[in-house]
Amino acid sequence: MSTLTKVLIVLLSLFAIFLCGTTVTFVGNASNYKKLLGEEMAVKKSLMAENSKLKRQYNEKIALVKELEKDLKERVQQLEDENSKLAVDLRKTERKSLEYQSRANSWAGVLASFEQTIGNLEQSLNLTQEQLNKARSEGIKDRKELNEITASLYEKMVQLESLEASRRRILEQKTSLEEQMSQFGGVGEISSAPPVTPEFDPMVMSSELPGELNLKGLVSEVGESLITISIGAADGIRKGMVLHVTRGDHFICDVIITEVDTNMAAGILDLVQQQPRINDVVSTRL
């Protein structure tokens, strides 16, 4: 056997060994590739299923978003309509506000004028009240002076009546004496006939005068314009008498007697300064 043949045999052996190793390696790798391919296919299917699920969810989300967008547009449109309506109402309210403000300014002027008028009326009322109080005070003073003048006049009338009664009595005595003298021819005893006119007693008339009496009593009942007092005819009270009602040092009013009973009397109020009360003092003199 030649060397070339041996070399070829060695080379063939080496090639066969290499080919076997390659085949074994290919077979082993082919089995691994198939397994990997199956795993990749399973992963692909899983990914495709997941992709389908995600696409379905995406489509659902898109539909939901579109629905929400539609609702949002409707809501925006509704809000815009409400905003337009509110803007119209705002303009109307502003016009009414301006109108009311104008009215308020006008009423403010009227109110200011009214307040000024009220102030003037109050000032005039105060002046009138002062004048009325002054007039009442003067009236009370004049009434007191009138009572004094009336009392003095009654006193003069009493004196005049006394003088007149004395004059008539003297005239009657003179006439009686002349008649007696004519009957007896001027001779004989002249009897003095009693006068026809009785002697005038000034105390009788003066006792009837309210200005000369000093009577005091109390207010027992009070009405709107009528009061009852605790003294009556037994104390010298007569109809038409004017009594004065006082409380402490303050003059309250006058009472003109209209009804008289034995131990009580009633009358109407006059020159009222204050409303009388029960237990106020009633007297004929201030």
Image: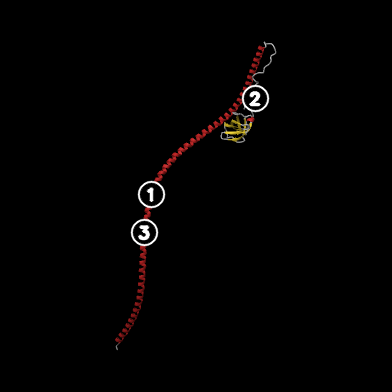
User: Quick check: 86 left or right of 161?
Assistant: left
User: Quick check: 254 left or right of 21?
Assistant: right
Label of residue 222 in the image? none
- Specify the farthest residue to the bottom: 1
Question: Which amino acid type is shown beneath numbered disc 3?
Answer: Glu
Q: Quadrant of the N terminus?
A: bottom left
- Estimate the x, y position of residue 191 in percent, counting from the top left: 69, 15
- Specify the farthest residue to the front: 183
Kindly state the secondary structure of the residue where label 1 is placed: helix
- Estimate the x, y position of residue 168 in percent, counting from the top left: 63, 18
Q: Nearer the viewer, residue 122 or 109?
A: 122
Q: Identify the image quadrant of residue 72.
A: bottom left
Q: Nearer the viewer, residue 258 or 25?
A: 258
- CA–CA distance between discs 2 and 1? 102 Å
Kindly state the secondary structure of the residue where label 2 is placed: helix
Q: Identify the image quadrant of residue 227.
A: top right
Q: Nearer the viewer, residue 203 or 276?
A: 203
Image point (47%, 36%), residue name: 114
Q: Which residue in the protein does label 2 denote? A: 204
Q: Which residue in the protein does label 1 denote? A: 85
Q: Mark 2 against mark 1, which lies toward the viewer?
A: 2
- Estimate the x, y position of residue 61 in percent, counting from the top left: 37, 62
Kindly state the secondary structure of the residue where label 3 is placed: helix
Image point (55%, 31%), residue name: 132
Question: Which amino acid type is shown beneath numbered disc 1?
Answer: Lys
How many C-alpha atoms fall within 10 Å of the one at disc 1: few (<14), some, or many (≥20)? few
Marks 2 and 1, the one that precedes in the sequence: 1
Q: Quadrant of the C terminus?
A: top right
Marks 1 and 3, the one that precedes in the sequence: 3
Q: Nearer the viewer, residue 33 or 117?
A: 117
Q: Is residue 229 above or below residue 94?
A: above
Q: Which residue in the protein does label 3 denote? A: 67
